[in-house]
Image (cartoon, helix red, strand yellow):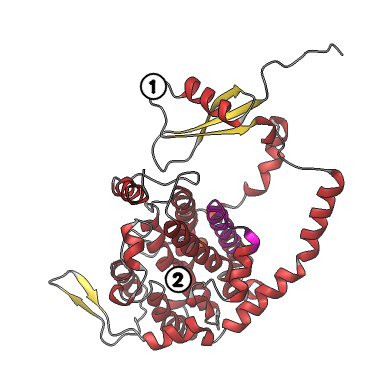
Amino acid sequence: MPHTTNTQGPLWEVFTQKKSGQPFTHAGSVHAFDKEMAIENARDLYTRRGEATGLWVVPAEAIVAVQPDEAAPFFDPSDDKIYRYPTFYEVPEGAKNI
Amino acid sequence: MNSDNRFEAFQQYIDSEEKIEPKDWMPDEYRLHNIRQISQHAHSEVIGMQPEGNWITRAPSLRAKKILLAKIQDEGGHGLYLYSAAETLGITRDELIEQLHSGKAKYSSVFNYPTLNWADIGAIGWLVDGAAVTNQLSLRRTSYGPYSRAMMRICNEESFHQRQGYEIMAKMATGTPEQHAMAQSAIDRWWWPALMMFGPHDNDSPRTSNGLRWKIKRAGNDELRQRFIDKTVPQAEVIGLKIPDPRLRWNEETQHYEIGPINWDEFHRVVRGEGPCNSQRMAHHKHWHAEGAWVREAAAAYAARHNTNPVRV
Ligand SMILES: [Fe+2]
Ligand SMILES: [Fe+2]
């Protein structure tokens, strides 16, 4: 196997929060050698136009993901439970706010 | 910044409807207030699985059983969302459970009542989840970000809980005379405990003011209770059930229902641990928590042996 050196440091996934209180959503990733460098690089790259009120960086290595070809059987158990939705139920005529 | 300025700036930040995130600076009292409220909320979701769990094996149909299982599974999930939110404030899951077991942390006293007949499952979904969701809809705007986001998820999921309960009540109330009597008995027993879920009157509630100032709570206990009463009384009328309150009346002037006095002695008795099922609920939780110890130990031992440290940078 050809040996390549990594001169960039580890990869960090970047999450931005668009409005105070909202969930943090994935924006992209950056390279950095430590937490401080990671958050500064993420700021410079992903929030140049005031896109964020909050910013998280997470080591990419720490992220666990479902593979696309596994997704269907993986999520399958929740597919047939229509009674988890409110529209499944009969509401008597005249009943409000329920 | 000196410390006075820091508190002032924090209050201004809250006043401008900004949300606080886990890594933000916050006063210790704000942190503790949130830990207390969120963990009490989490414990309530989890302990609340017990009265409903009582009927899983006796649900009257496969349809009813599947719905009840799905509902209780959601409540377990709600507990986990909330424990996770509390843990972002720097307390561990083990400490949270320990506080529940020692009695330092409370859970909603409504879950210390027994479920005596199938209509009680209807009454819980309709009245207890109905009261809970009234509070939770308001808490979507709480000032602590992770708590607010947990509330959004929970409110979405709750939409079927109240309906399945109301559907059970409607079916029984319009069924045979015996079924109607069971439904009426259930509302007779659950109406007042559901009203008590909102907590003491605001004048008698020591923590309400701090909670409101920091926008951890967004509405007072009495206001939320009134909202619940106003939407629930007409729902009872539609299915032909009587609210067990001879003093209940509609006030044309205020456009609100007025109720008779709440039995606060009973409330405090149940909070103190003297309700019909307090010791049973706690013993059950302790027992099954201890029964699960080997699973946690095995997982930790496996991780130590295989060095599966999930995060290393
Ligand atoms: Fe819940
Ligand atoms: Fe619920």
- B44 or B133: nearer the eye? B44
**Does the beta carbon of the residue at mark 2 sit less than 8 Å from ligand 2?**
yes
Q: Residues within 10 Å of mark 1 (few under 14, many from 20)?
A: few
Q: Is residue B178 above or below residue B136?
A: below
Q: Which amino acid, mark 1?
A: Arg
Q: What chain does badge 2 belong to?
A: B
Q: Residue at x 52, y 53 (%)?
A: B89
Q: Residue at x 73, y 41 (%)?
A: B310
Q: Main secondary structure of the magenta part?
A: helix
| Left or right, residue B264 beside residue A41 | left
To which residue does mark 1 refer? A49
Whole-percent x and y of residue B195?
A: 37, 76
Q: Which residues are magenta?
A: B72-94
Q: Is residue A51 above or below residue B180?
A: above
Q: Residue at x 52, y 73 (%)?
A: B106
> For the residues marked 2 and 1, what is the alpha-carbon distance in whole angstroms?
46 Å
| Left or right, residue B271 beside residue B215 | right
- A82 or B156: nearer the eye? B156
